[in-house]
Image (spheres, rainbow, N blue to C red):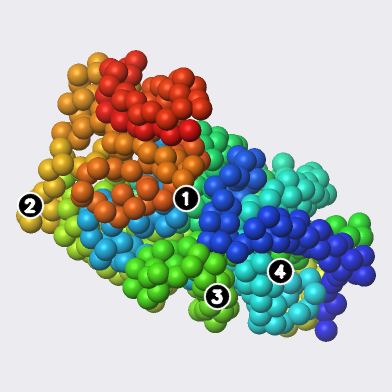
Amino acid sequence: MLERNTFSIADYVVFGLTLAVSACIGLYYGCTGGKQRTTSEFLMADRNMAWAPVTMSLLASFMSAITLLGTPAEVYTYGTHYWMIVLSYFIVIPVSAHCFIPIFFRLRLTSTYEYLAIRFESNIVRLLGSLTFIIQMVLYMAIVLYAPALALNSVTGLGVWASVLSIGLVCTFYTTIVGMRGGDVDSSFRRSLLHVAAWCGVLIKRMGKLGQTVGSHRVLDFSVDPLQRHTFWSLVVGGAFTWTAIYGVNQAQVQRCNTCPKLRSAQIAMWINLPGLTALATICSLAGLVIYAVYAQCDPLTTKTILAKDQLLPLFVMDHLSFLPGLPGLFVACLFSGALSTISSGLNSLAAVTLEDIIKPYVFKNLADERYALISKGMAILYGGAAIGLTAVAAQLGGVLQAALSIFGMIGGPLLGLFSLGIFFPWANKWGAIFGHIGGLTISFWIGLGAYVNKPNFYTNPTSIDGCSNDTLAYANLTLPYEKAPFVEKEVFPLYRLSYMWYSAVGCMSVIVLGLIISFMTGPTKPASLNPALICPWFDYTLCCLPKKIRHFLWCGVQHDKILFSAIKKEDDVATIVRDNKTNDALSKSVADNPVFSYNDADVCPEMALRQREKEAESKHSHRSESNGAAPKDGAECNVTYTTAL
């Protein structure tokens, strides 16, 4: 039997110590302070996280072992076209940071899907969105579990399913202990140290091989054929839809942004992700080129050295980096910790959504907050078990990168369309939201499941076994000369050959188009009747150079110059914002439960915040009410009346 390199004692020591340090950081922050006894601390880190750990946590949440293993495997198998997805990040980050995140942040919601109930005045829309998200994240976490299990199998010989079970149990237990704060701080440690060390080792060792490979790979392909697997347009435009669904409306990302005390901090965290995402995608793509240069003449898949293409990177690490004791252990710890971070954020977000959208409204309506915190931890354990069980499904989906992005396209695309329908189109009503979302999901699943069943094939990079040793050939029962079967395109229904990078765009646009048609058929919402805090004035961002009158016309009747909140009061030394508008009771309650100072009132209306601070200074040690009737500098009316009692 052909001998394979596996972990040395030094690798096991480094692997264990690295994870131990990471776990201790998370456990320290998870078990100090309030010790995760309240939902605010367990789910939202008491909304006082600094932007630095939130930045790293945002990057860690969806840049897991899937990216680290899947991107090199993608480049090895199909070429360097995938790298162009970094261009989509330059669309994703601005749109997410300035169009979506401000809406959710200012409402101070624990569950993103509370917005749907407020905007469409329908708990059915909220429940529909929540259930869709739950399905998406459980499937995604199953893939996240499967990826590092492949790596552990490759370097330790531990069975894939034993690895899945061990990783799943550790991740689930970890999440129930550390909560949101511990996960965020721990992610900072993992991303800043482990990835840098591991990837530098991969690239430096074989950088000389890189130049031989780059020239033979074409990065840019401007074909407009949507049936071609990867093109400039599918990766940039389609990728923008896919990643906006993640960074703009996904509960895991929005929940992390909402742990910041100020909107500006959340936006800074978003923007710093731009170079982080670009650097990580670039390094992973370069690693794929290095691996292709090393193994193209002795393909490990053909020789059955590995079980799946996603084991290429661990194989490379063991073959070419084991000369330095401990480095392979550090690298695998990087993959393991990446999965830990992603699953932790996923389980936390699932617990938040289930608690706020299902448990509180329909199951246990009036429990103490500590009871709800215990229920949240129980839900995290339940979803961890579900993810472990569904890993068997993930193993049948092929490459982990395409499988993950396909799920985000098929399910995340319609979710993005549902939120976009509410945030950008004031005429949409609840019927448009309900049936538009169902229609978008139906179309997305029809295409995605059709592609999975029919399995269309695409041209791959040329590989051979001409450079293999005799022992390798004998182990695989192969002889030279060996001719690979020529590529023949499989005949399938054209729609099933649609690039998986277009799934999100198709799902999103289907929801918007169907939703608007149904809304106008059933009686559109009157824009003037909507609370302006629920609608994004996106023309103010994209066409800010236009005169104010034109931009006001483009508001389509939404009164963006009116402030959301009509009163601020202070009772029992706790300042809260309330509304005297009797509509949207869910919004009134959500807002009334949040302190104004932690709310960052400057994000609501800067002029209001300034005047409030002036009044409080004047009224120190006294009790009086003041009314703010002056207009802010930009001419917009805040219409805020507040009472200060000190």
Give the crowd class for mark 2: few <14, some 14-19, many >=20 residues within 10 Å: few
Q: Is residue 459 visible?
A: no
In the rendered structure, which disc, 2 or 4, sits on the residue that comes first in sequence? 4
Q: Amino acid at mark 1?
A: Val
| Secondary structure at numbered mark 1 | helix
Q: Quadrant of the N terminus?
A: bottom right
Q: Amino acid at mark 3?
A: Gly
Horizontal and vertical percent position of residue 611: 41, 22
> In this figure, which residue is indicated by the disc labeled 4?
151
Q: CA distance from mark 3 to mark 2?
A: 43 Å
> In this figure, which residue is indicated by the disc labeled 2?
523
Question: Which residue is at a point 43% across and 22% down the rendered structure image?
Answer: 615
Do labels 1 and 4 touch, CB within 8 Å? Answer: no
Give the crowd class for mark 3: few <14, some 14-19, many >=20 residues within 10 Å: some
**Residue 408 placement: quadrant:** bottom left
| Secondary structure at numbered mark 3 | helix
Horizontal and vertical percent position of residue 299: 69, 66
1 or 4: mark nearer the eye: 1
| Secondary structure at numbered mark 2 | loop
Q: CA distance from mark 4 to mark 3?
A: 29 Å
In the rendered structure, which disc, 1 or 4, sits on the residue that comes first in sequence? 4
Q: Amino acid at mark 2?
A: Gly
Q: Is residue 275 left or right of residue 15?
A: left
Do labels 3 and 2 touch, CB within 8 Å? Answer: no
> In this figure, which residue is indicated by the disc labeled 1?
254
